[in-house]
Image: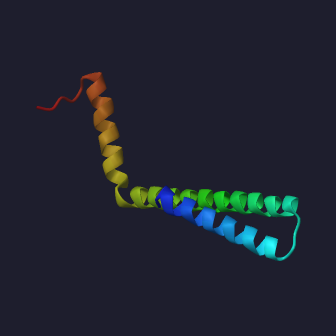
Amino acid sequence: MKLAPFLAGMVASSTLVAIVASSAGLSLSAIIGLVVLTLVVAQLLYLGLILMLTRAERQRREAEEPSETQGSTDLAIAGSRGEARRG
């Protein structure tokens, strides 16, 4: 997920919260508090999304190529000992 759409959504939601809060007659400090709370919640949701996407990608890679990773590790170990040399 790109950062620009997230920032645009964060600004739009904060603006909407500020408009609704001011039309409801809340004080300036309450409006600022609600906007800050909206920004914090949006950032936490974005962080959660990044963590979920990272976990899903890691699980996909582990399920896709478990033996190839092990084989390349074995070659690297053998190559560093000088036991197996290729071409």
Instruction: Establish if 41 lies above or below 23.
Output: above
Q: Is residue 35 visible?
A: yes
> Is any part of residue 52 visible from this angle?
no
Is 84 on the left or on the right of 18, as rendered?
Answer: left
| Colour style of the rendered protein structure | rainbow
Residue 51 horizontal side relative to residue 64, left or right = right
8 or 43: which is nearer to us?
Answer: 8
Image x and y of residue 43, in percent = 65, 57
Query: Residue 52's spot in the image, x, y percent?
Result: 55, 61
Residue sitting at x 55%, y 57%: 50
User: Where does the image place residue 17, in percent across and percent down from the top left?
Assistant: 73, 70
Quadrant housing residue 41: bottom right
Farthest residue to the left: give it.
Answer: 87
Horizontal and vertical percent position of residue 27: 88, 65
Image check: 14 left or right of 85? right
For the residue pair 50 and 32, the one nearer the viewer reads as 32
Q: Residue at x 37, y 54 (%)?
A: 66
* Quarter of the image where the C terminus is located: top left
